[in-house]
Image (cartoon, helix red, strand yellow):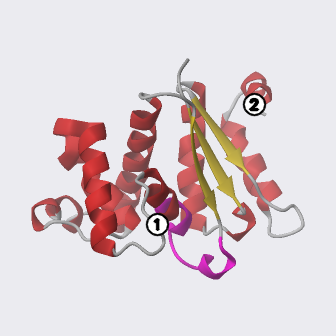
Amino acid sequence: PRQFARRGHEARRNQSGMSYWMARDMVRCFVGAGPNDTPAETAAALRQAAKKLFGPRLAEVYPFISQLAETPLEPDMQGAIRELSPAALRGRLHWAFAEWVRALCGRGPLALVWEDLHWADRSSLDLIETLLPLAAELPLVIFLVYRQTEGDMDTWCAVSYTHLRAHETDSYL
């Protein structure tokens, strides 16, 4: 039997104004970095994990995951980010995170648990939205947990699910 990996993120109210903070915490969870780890320690763990997952594709994905995690990036990797427009950088961050999830799913089933979405920043919600279609093609389940009494998450979830056909939505819920 294959192992089922669970990666989770629990939102914290005091981070609700920071861009990609939920995704940043999820990346740190992926590599086992703790809240007390220094940026250098987190960067080392991130680079080691990226080397294992991507091998020769490291330079393609790692700079954007590092940017997402807000870890120091080696000078030889900074060129991939330096020249991008904000919109292009956003697209590459989403692509790299999706590639990370694909690589983890290649090792076995994965559950992503995003908790307290009612406190999520817009950039994290946009990134999560780009991941939803992956559940149709990968051994992946995504749990979105929020309080209906706070925020406007019902509207976000309804809009986010519109890209799924009705029969697919039922199979995911």
Q: In this view, does 72 lie to the left or right of 29?
A: left
Closest to the observer, 85 or 21: 21
Rendered image quadrant of residue 164: top right
| Residue beneath disc 1 | 34
Is residue 17 found inside the magenta-colored segment of the image?
yes
Q: Name the residue under label 2.
A: 169
At 73% from the left and 55% from the top, the residue drawn is 156
Query: In the rendering, at what x and y percent does residue 95 appear?
Result: 39, 46
Give the class, few, some or many, for how many residues have Cα within 10 Å of label 1's Cα (few <14, many ≥20): few
Question: For the residue marked with disc 2, what is the amino acid?
Answer: Thr
Residue 170 % position (x, y): 80, 28
Q: In this view, does 26 lie to the left or right of 55?
A: right
Of badges 1 and 2, nearer the viewer stands: 1
| The residue positioned farthest toward the top in the image shown | 1
Q: In this view, does 47 lie to the left or right of 25?
A: left
Give the residues drawn in magenta, as a range.
12-24
Quadrant (top left/top right/bottom left/bottom right) for the C terminus: top right
Nearer the observer, 133 or 71: 71
Residue 49, placed above or below residue 26: above
The numbered mark, 1 or 2, whose residue comes first in the sequence reads 1
